Amino acid sequence: MSLFDDIFDEDPSLEGGQPFGPQEGFAGVLLCASACDGHVGDEESQALGMIIHQKKLFSRLTDQQHASLHNRLAGELRRGGPEKLLEKSYPAVPPELRECVFANAVDIVLADGVVEQEEKEFIDTLQEKLEIDGKRAKTIVQVMVFKNHG
Amino acid sequence: MGLFDTLFSGLDSRTKLSPQESFAGILLAASACDGHISEDEFAQFITTLFRMKLFERVNEKQFNQVLNKLMGVLKKSGPDVLVDGCVETLPDNLKKSAFTNACNIVLADGVLEADEKEFINTLMKKLGIPAETAKTIATVMVIKNKG
């Protein structure tokens, strides 16, 4: 931990300590999905970029705001790892997008064709945190497996 | 009819498609079924294929050849003929995947037009996907493409 981390942790008004907005929440959860096995693979990174590019939620952000969002999330991930980033991200996801972010997180985890133990655990944790009904979550996972087959 | 017309006048035995071409052809038809291919739909089409193991041994030159061949059929005969040819040669184990990704592509621009709805219904029947399974797949793809 660096000198700056202490300062940011103690004063939430400083950069890094401010609560996330909907865009940061949504993208933060997906970045956690990419990073939950310890590295962000090429396919996972591409899938994340593609999702953000398509969502109306991000359509009004300027290039500068996109870059700033990316830097902030990458910084959070570097400092606290996926667990802390997730803790900060999921409460900021608007309720109507909770199933959507879950579906996209599952899609990212399956993007490289391999589901590692950490990724399984991440998806289980995410389902609980986002309070997605077990049967509904299972259906979403099943369809994402179809999508990523082959 | 010219010498080259037979090549693209429907998919006869001379243009039998590989599994890669069949899969890509269905997704290309999904992108084009409303009369135009939007930027989002094309980007989704490309991303989907490059993520697949099916395409990992296909180099750029080969991919362009696949794309040119499929585009030729699409322009000459339209999405329905393209799908008919692709469905015949698509391996059974890729049918649900093709259907799911086709749903994802038509929903990629956030709008589902009447032509696209009809395309998905027809594709479901042509691929032999049970209606209940197709409904579940479409529901989850709507969730995924929300927001």
Image: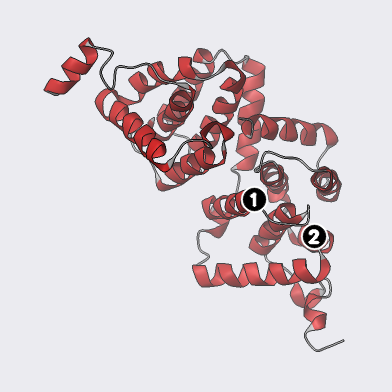
Q: Do the residues bearing badges 2 and 1 touch, measured as CB atoms within 8 Å?
A: no
Tell me which residue sits at (39%, 16%) in the image: A87
**Residue B140 in picture, x, y percent from top left:** 68, 31
Q: Chain of mark 1?
A: B
Residue occupying the point 47% across, 42% down: A49
* Residue that appears at 80% across and 89% down: B3
As drawn, B61 above or below B86: below
The residue wearing badge 2 is B79
Mark 1 falls on what kind of element? Answer: helix
Q: Is residue B5 visible?
A: yes
Q: Residue furthest bottom?
A: B3
Q: Residue reaching furthest top?
A: A10
Q: Residue at x 32, y 30 (%)?
A: A72
Residue denoted by label 1: B41
Instruction: Note whether B110 is above or below A92 in the view shown.
Output: below
Horizontal placement of A130 versus A21: left or right?
right
